[in-house]
Image: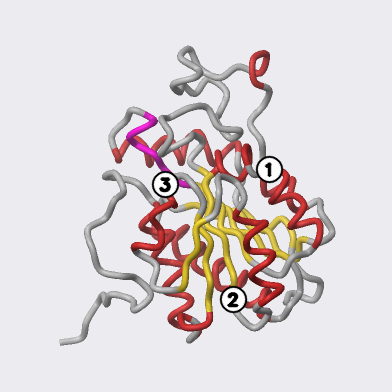
Amino acid sequence: MQPIFEYTKGMIPGETNYCPGCTHGISHRLIMEVLDEMGRLGSTIGVGPIGCSVLAHKYMNVDMLEAAHGRAPAVASGIKRVHPGNLVFTYQGDGDLASIGAAEIIHAAARGEKFTSFFVNNAIYGMTGGQMAPTTLIGQKSTTTQNGRTVEQAGAPMRVSELIATLDGAAYVERVALNSPANIKNAKKAVRRAFEIQDKNLGFSFVEFLSTCPTNWGVSPAKAMAFLSEKMLPYFPLGVYRAPEGGE
């Protein structure tokens, strides 16, 4: 019988730590599946900081390090400079990357550090209690915005891909979503392209995953997918925001 699904060697079997409906597992699978297909599982180093990704090392079958909250880009910069032949990536949430680690990600991109950052944008702090993140939408409720985020109180949500794309050291920036088979298929292509650009030493590469967090949004997994489609996609448009000239 022809198998229709196989467990990638890039994932370590085990019970998931993530909540029902969370899309971290999808992004984990895509990254590891690409590395497996590229034959790079044995020559890749990942960095996971504080947040839901703190346990990524339990699932990703590559060498992994932990970093302090927000500091994964600084750690990855050092790793890549010491091991230029390895693929190096960070896996970060929006509170970690866009708030606590904003300086680290901006300056790593500005320097053109030759590693890849995977940015999981679920518009809220996940592991630490559901607080407002820089990407929390206007009107969206969180533990620190009980009546919904307002521009007057917290400013407008940050569009990180657009910001990173303005920096000359960024070679490739794309925003994808994990809410449908078609978008997931495109997300995998973005992951591969980011690693290929890193392999060619073209500069910093960045992939943003629009993701769900049913638990901290206070909705069912099905309604979380609807929120992503109806609320997040209009504010965070999908697409390539920066790519090397010549279509590398």
Q: Secondary structure at mark 1?
A: helix
Residue under pointer 1: 102
The kind of residue tagged 2 is Leu
Furthest residue toward right: 168
Residue located 77% across and 52% down the image? 107
Name the quadrant containing residue 221: top left
The kind of residue tagged 1 is Ala
Q: Secondary structure at mark 3?
A: helix
Relative placement, left or right, of 62 versus 2 is right
Q: CA distance from mark 2 to mark 1?
A: 23 Å
Residue 87: which numbered mark, if any?
2
Name the quadrant containing residue 98: top right
Asked whether 207 or 63 is in front, the reply is 63
Relative placement, left or right, of 195 versus 3 is right
Asked whether 99 or 232 is in front, the reply is 99
> Which residues, given as a range, are shown in magenta?
211-217
Residue located 27% across and 77% down the image? 6
Relative placement, left or right, of 177 versus 206 is left
With respect to residue 239, does 70 lie above or below?
above
Q: How is the image coloured?
A: secondary structure
Q: CA distance from mark 2 to mark 3?
A: 22 Å
Sequence order check: which comes first, mark 2 or mark 3? 3
With respect to residue 228, does 56 lie above or below?
below
Relative placement, left or right, of 100 versus 33 is right
Sequence order check: which comes first, mark 2 or mark 1? 2
Sequence order check: which comes first, mark 3 or mark 1? 3
Residue under pointer 3: 52
Residues marked 2 and 1 touching at CB (< 8 Å):
no
Q: Position of residue 95 (x, y in %)?
A: 55, 38
Name the quadrant containing residue 81: bottom right
Q: Position of residue 197 (x, y in %)?
A: 68, 74
Residue located 64% across and 58% down the image? 174
